[in-house]
Image: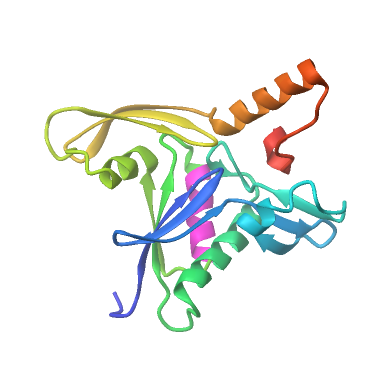
Amino acid sequence: MPAFSRELGIDLGTMNTVICEGNQILLEEPTVVALVVDEQKLVEWGQAAKDMVGRVPESIEVVRPLHHGVIAEYEITEKLLSFLVKKVSGPMRFFRPTLMITVPYGITSVESRAVHEAGLGAGSREVILIQQPLAAAIGVDMPISTPSGNMILSLGGGTSQAAVLAMNDIVRADTSRTGGVKLDEAIIALLGRNTGLSSGNQQRNNSR
């Protein structure tokens, strides 16, 4: 590996994306983009795009490109990753970073390949995928290298995951493609029925 190549960890979530290097968080932004509808041109991303919800004309659309923890809008996700990686790495003319990207447990090979290719398309030299329960357990220093079982629950915007880990691997796990987004939708629907008020997030993928 080139001496100046960086190694970045990316938690690519339905609600938020976090980029870290070693033990340091370099960036944390909502996984949201705003784009011109006719041109599909990205005009804002992250918190700036999230703040535009409900405040833009019909020519601008605010989108969550991930749904249930997997890529729903491939080209938009690739552009977003490219922006985020360049923000923390700067120009990548010579030494492109290696990326380790989290994915939900149990996703299909097609869904995994989409994440892998999006990472390469964002300008990395190599992409390594790691399952989110394993990454979460490592992140909180659980003693998963022992034969004893350790359980972890990972509750995200698009998925809820439970896993038992031992000997540095996942022994058993399950993923429900229901998370915080569905809870938000349920609350918004309840408010609408009981009060007639319209509120909450209006990003395109939240309605799927």
Looking at the image, residue 47 sits to the left or right of residue 128; the answer is: right
Can I make out residue 4 in this image?
yes
Q: Residue at x 75, y 58 (%)?
A: 35
Q: Which residue is farthest top?
A: 194
Residue 2 on image: x %, y %: 30, 79
Which contiguous range is marked in magenta?
111-121
Image quarter of the N terminus: bottom left
Residue 122 on image: x %, y %: 53, 66
Please name whichever residue, 31 or 98, is drawn nearer the observer in this view of the structure. 31
Height in image: 199 above or below 112? above
Q: Is residue 119 magenta?
A: yes
Residue 27 on image: x %, y %: 47, 61
Q: Which residue is farthest left?
A: 147
Looking at the image, residue 178 sits to the left or right of residue 128; the answer is: right
Please name whichever residue, 84 or 27, is drawn nearer the observer in this view of the structure. 27
Q: Is residue 103 magenta?
A: no
Instruction: Name the quadrant containing residue 183.
Output: top right
Q: Residue at x 43, y 83 (%)?
A: 94
Q: Residue at x 81, y 62 (%)?
A: 39
Residue 139 on image: x %, y %: 29, 47
Please name whichever residue, 1 or 92, is drawn nearer the observer in this view of the structure. 92
Q: Residue at x 51, y 58 (%)?
A: 117
Image quarter of the C terminus: top right
Instruction: Name the quadrant containing residue 150.
Output: top left
Can I make out residue 75 in this image?
no
